Structures are given as C-alpha cells and as structure tokens.
C-alpha cells in the first residue's frame, strides 16, 4: 500500500507548479518581487497557523508552534523595511485533523524547498539576518525535521479517508497561497 506522501505529491503536483510559477525563483532576486512574496506569506501565516491549531488535537499545538517560521518571516520584513502583509488572507477552515496534516504538508514542504530558494537568494545578497531567514528556516536541521514530519504523516493519516481529506486540504492550501500571490503580484496563472 502506498503511503500518504506519494499520494499528496501526486494530488498537489499542478497546484505546486502554479505557486512555483508565481514565486519565480529568478524574480525572487528582485527586491520588490521578493518583498511582496514575503508579505503574502506573512498574511497567509497569520491566518493559517490559527486555522491549523483549531483543527489539530491540543497535543500537537506546542509542536506546531515550535516549528513556526513566522518569526523568521517577521525578521525578514523588518530587515528589509517592508510592512507586514494585510490581515485578511481568507484562509479556509480545515475540517479536522487529517485536513490539517494535509495543509501542514504544504508548509513543511516549503521549509524543505526553502533551502534551495535560500541558496539562490544568497547570490542576490539576501542571507539570514539580511532578509532571507524565512527561506533559510532551520538550515541544516531542515532535512531531519522533514523526515520526522514524513513519519508523522504516515501515523496521522492511517485512518480511512484520511489521505483523501489531506490531499483536498493540501490542494486548497496551495490554491489559497496562489490566489493571494496573484492578487498581490497582479498576475494570473493557469489554475490547477
């Protein structure tokens, strides 16, 4: 039987590609584009983290708060002299723990992918402490944190219907972020 991770990857492939097109690694070196991406992530995380906490059992709240990269993001905005993002991100509610784990897949995966983004940003003079702490995230610890998360996905999405709920929520999470980026960047991309 296939575990949840390959199913999540397959279900979200086009949704993930859409957000990658909007963020555009080459354009992330342009400070204005980069600052706007950070503002969108700030607005998103301000609404997303409480939504995930509301959907997860209480025993996971401390775990989630300890993994929050929002303090890194706020430090980046301050370092770049950029105001925080708007507060009306419009993050949809998550219908239960399986949906929360699917949404977490998106953000935990972004921490892993952020490592490649951080390397590219370093070439543009953006480093942790100088505007790229969010994408640098946990640095060398990121791989181990991703492996831990994968094991948690296997355990938390073992129930009937859980993977389907997680896949739906992961797609909605990608779409919410993409829609916010489109509005903020004044760009349109093909929907997944």
Image (cartoon, helix red, strand yellow):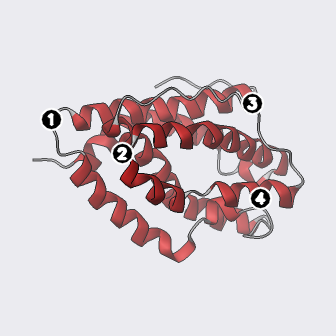
Q: Which residue is mark 3?
A: 184
Q: Position of residue 106 (x, y in %)?
A: 46, 45
Left or right: residue 192 versus residue 117 is: left
From the viewer's side, name the closer residue of 117 and 81: 81
Pointer 1 local density, CA inside 10 Å: few below 14, some 14–19, many at least 20: few
Q: CA distance from mark 2 to mark 3?
A: 33 Å
N-term mark: 1 or 4 = 4
Residue 41, quarter of picture: top right
Q: In terms of sequence position, does the residue under pointer 2 or pointer 1 come before the other?
A: 2
Nearer to us: label 2 or label 3: 2
Towards the viewer: 97 or 172: 97
Which mark's residue is nearer the viewer, 1 or 4? 1
Please report the residue visible at 24 percent of the width from the left and 45 percent of the height from the top.
157
| Residue bearing mark 2 | 57
Please tell me whether mark 4 or mark 2 is closer to you in this view.
2
Circle 2: element type? loop
Answer yes or no: do the residues labelled 1 and 4 have beta carbons within 8 Å? no
């Amino acid at each position: 039987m296939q575990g949840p991770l390959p199913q999540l990857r397959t279900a979200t492939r086009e949704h993930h590609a859409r957000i990658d097109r909007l963020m555009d690694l080459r354009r992330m070196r342009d400070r204005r584009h980069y600052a706007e991406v950070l503002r969108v992530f700030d607005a998103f995380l301000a609404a997303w983290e409480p939504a995930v906490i509301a959907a997860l059992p209480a025993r996971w709240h401390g775990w989630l708060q300890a993994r929050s990269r929002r303090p890194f993001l706020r430090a980046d905005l301050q370092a770049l002299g950029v105001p925080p993002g708007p507060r009306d991100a419009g993050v949809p509610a998550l219908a239960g723990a399986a949906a929360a784990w699917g949404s977490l897949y998106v953000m935990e995966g972004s921490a892993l992918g952020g490592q490649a983004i951080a390397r590219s940003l370093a070439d543009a003079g953006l480093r942790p402490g100088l505007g790229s702490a969010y994408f640098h995230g946990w640095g060398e610890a990121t791989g181990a944190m991703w492996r831990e998360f994968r094991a948690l996905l296997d355990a938390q999405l073992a129930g009937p219907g859980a993977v389907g709920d997680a896949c739906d929520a992961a797609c909605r999470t990608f779409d919410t972020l993409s829609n916010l980026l489109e509005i903020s960047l004044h760009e349109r991309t093909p929907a997944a």
